[in-house]
Image (cartoon, rainbow, N blue to C red):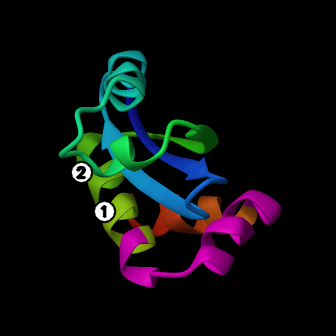
């Protein structure tokens, strides 16, 4: 299963956007991140959003699109307006 995921830290007031094909392992990696990893800067990361994609290519394109937006408001709107996710999936299908 290919997943784009967004984590949020209240401590940092930041989002982390990632892609994985092994979600459980990847989340454990973030929970146990070493000091040189971005997610090691906080210990309160929670799953904000999970987008299941049809292929690795689609997932990587959606991840890149969200990162390129560089907008907390855009990320928050992904949760608020699920139709944005559907448009992204159609665009990168």
Q: Which residues are magenta?
A: 67-82
Return the residue at label 2.
57
Q: Given the current orientation, which residue lies at the most extreme left position? A: 36
Residue 69 marker? none
| Separation of marks 1 and 2 at Cα, in angstroms | 6 Å
Position above or below: 71 against 89: below
Position above or below: 7 against 33: below
List x then y, in percent, for residue 72: 61, 75
- Dot 1 falls on a residue whose secondary structure is helix
Residue 74 is covered by the magenta coloring: yes
- Residue occupying image coordinates x 30% and y 52%: 38
- Residue occupying image coordinates x 52% and y 50%: 6
- Residue occupying image coordinates x 67% and y 64%: 78
Q: 11 left or right of 19?
A: right
List x then y, in percent, for residue 73: 68, 79
Q: Residues within 10 Å of mark 1 (few under 14, many from 20)?
A: some
- Dot 2 falls on a residue whose secondary structure is helix
Position above or below: 1 against 49: above
Splitting the image into 4 quarters, where does residue 29 fall?
A: top left
List x then y, in percent, for residue 10: 67, 54
61, 54: nearer the viewer: 61
List x then y, in percent, for residue 25: 33, 17
Return the residue at label 1.
61
67, 43: nearer the viewer: 43
Where does the C terminus fall, quadrant-wise?
Answer: bottom left
Q: Are marks 1 and 2 in contact (CB under 8 Å)?
A: yes
């Amino acid at each position: 299963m290919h997943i784009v995921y967004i984590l949020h830290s209240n401590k940092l007031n930041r989002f982390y956007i990632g892609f994985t094909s092994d979600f459980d392992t990847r989340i454990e990696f973030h929970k146990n991140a070493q000091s040189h990893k971005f997610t090691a800067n906080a210990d309160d990361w929670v799953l904000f959003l999970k987008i299941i994609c049809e292929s690795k290519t689609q997932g990587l394109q959606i991840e890149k699109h969200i990162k390129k937006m560089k907008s907390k408001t855009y990320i928050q709107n992904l949760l608020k307006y699920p139709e944005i996710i559907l448009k992204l999936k159609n665009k990168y299908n």
